[in-house]
């Protein structure tokens, strides 16, 4: 009887061991994890070479790890256990910081490799200087707009026993803007502006972007600087009283909270704004006529992609006011919340995300369209990043 029971247990164990990989391979699998914000391992492709060098089995291990049945449920349960029962502050590489602020977990790597990252800033400055010269040769002006990332803005909200990269952020900012100053490159340092404002509501606590308040403050600074520095006749920035501001009912699904399966209590809401004095425009998103500036589904909680539908490779907004200058913006997702306000002051506004736009390089695009003003908008984690929106040719 005992021998039969032992065999039965072994048989069940073997069935489970073999059934899980088979069922995992048979089920429909997604390519991207929205929770982890990453691409999942693809189904391994067999070849004799992969089999002999062990790569085939290694790929299967990664595939099963990413797609195993019940994976999301297990990770969600693990997250809930650590958050609600064990009371941990570091879960899924997210820090639950002071004042319920969700922040990324950092190793000491960036601080230890500070010299490497600062050297990248030297190369980036040289590239920006060349870009500025190219823009001027086409009759335009260039501005670099530097923004603190959320973890940089809220670095004081890390508990003392976690790395907050304060040394890196300070040195990074000083080096970047000293380089720009010496190279006579126009810039706007929004970290300095935010410091003077002393408004902690400029950034979201559960997402890696700024809030509407922070984006509006950035918009005002950009328009003021372009008017005062360049003498552009583009009108004053719109006052709050000149905007219809709408706060969406449901709390935001923040990118930081997503890594916690949205289990962290959050009541932050997204605000959007329309000029009270509307103007006509035609908007094209990736070549398709698309009039929306905000993408709202009232049945779902919004995310930061409410603004302009998230990252797009090319957006064109034409207001058909040829007496006004033309604007070109390029940058990562921080530009999205600025675009519905900036376009109001220009004849034609073009927005590129060079991570996705591959039809031509930035130099060629400028040669073709000859914008009056070019804005490069980046957060301080990417100041020296030579890829994506840091790659001009």
Image (tube, rainbow, N blue to C red):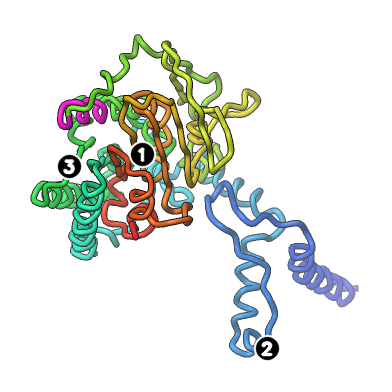
As drawn, the residue found furthest toward the left would be: 182
Does 382 sit left or right of 171 as displayed?
A: right
Residue range of the region highlighted in magenta in the rendering: 221-230
Residue 91 to residue 109: above or below: above
- Per the image, the residue denoted by label 2 is 48
**Residue 279 numbered tag:** none
Which residue is tagged 1? 97
Q: Is residue 228 magenta?
A: yes
SS at circle 1: loop
CA neighbours of label 2 inside 10 A, class few (<14), some (14 to 19), many (20+):
few
The answer to which of marks 1 and 3 sits earlier in the sequence is: 1
Mark 2 to mark 1 CA distance (whole Å)? 50 Å
Give the Cα distance between marks 3 and 2: 56 Å
Residue 116, by quadrant, is bottom left
Magenta span contains residue 139: no
Q: Nearer the viewer, residue 200 or 287?
A: 287
Q: Which residue is mark 3?
A: 186
Q: Earlier in the sequence, mark 3 or mark 2?
A: 2
């Amino acid at each position: 009887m005992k021998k039969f029971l032992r065999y039965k247990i072994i048989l069940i164990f073997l069935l489970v061991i073999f059934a899980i990989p088979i069922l995992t391979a048979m089920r429909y699998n997604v390519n991207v994890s929205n929770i982890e914000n990453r691409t999942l391992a693809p189904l391994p492709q067999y070849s004799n070479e992969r089999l002999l060098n062990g790569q085939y089995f290694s790929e299967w291990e990664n595939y099963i790890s990413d797609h195993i049945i019940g994976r999301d449920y297990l990770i969600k349960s693990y997250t809930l256990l650590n958050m609600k029962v064990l009371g941990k502050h570091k879960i899924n590489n997210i820090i639950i910081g002071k004042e319920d602020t969700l922040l990324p977990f950092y190793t000491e790597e960036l601080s230890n490799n500070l010299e490497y990252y600062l050297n990248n800033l030297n190369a980036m400055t040289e590239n920006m200087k060349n870009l500025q010269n190219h823009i001027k040769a086409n009759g335009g002006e260039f501005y670099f707009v530097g923004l603190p990332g959320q973890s940089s803005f809220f670095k004081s909200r890390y508990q003392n026993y976690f790395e907050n990269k304060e040394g890196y952020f300070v040195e990074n900012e000083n080096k970047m803007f000293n380089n720009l100053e010496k190279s006579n490159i126009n810039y706007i340092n929004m970290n300095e502006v935010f410091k003077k404002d002393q408004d902690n509501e400029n950034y979201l606590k559960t997402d890696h972007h700024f809030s509407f308040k922070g984006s509006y403050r950035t918009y005002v600074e950009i328009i003021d600087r372009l008017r005062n520095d360049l003498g552009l006749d583009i009108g004053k920035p719109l006052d709050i009283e000149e905007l219809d501001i709408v706060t969406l009912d449901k709390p935001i699904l923040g990118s930081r909270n997503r890594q916690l399966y949205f289990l962290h209590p959050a009541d932050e809401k997204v605000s959007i704004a329309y000029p009270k004095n509307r103007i006509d425009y035609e908007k094209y998103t990736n070549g398709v006529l698309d009039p929306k500036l905000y993408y709202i589904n009232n049945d779902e909680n919004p995310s930061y992609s409410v603004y302009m539908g998230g990252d797009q490779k090319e957006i064109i907004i034409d207001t058909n006011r040829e007496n006004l200058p033309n604007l070109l913006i390029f940058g990562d997702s921080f530009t999205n919340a600025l675009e519905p306000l900036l376009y109001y002051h220009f004849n034609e506004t073009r927005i590129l995300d060079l991570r996705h736009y591959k039809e031509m390089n930035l130099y060629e695009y400028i040669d073709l369209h000859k914008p009056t003003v070019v804005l490069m908008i980046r957060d301080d984690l990417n100041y020296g990043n030579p890829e994506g929106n840091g790659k001009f040719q």
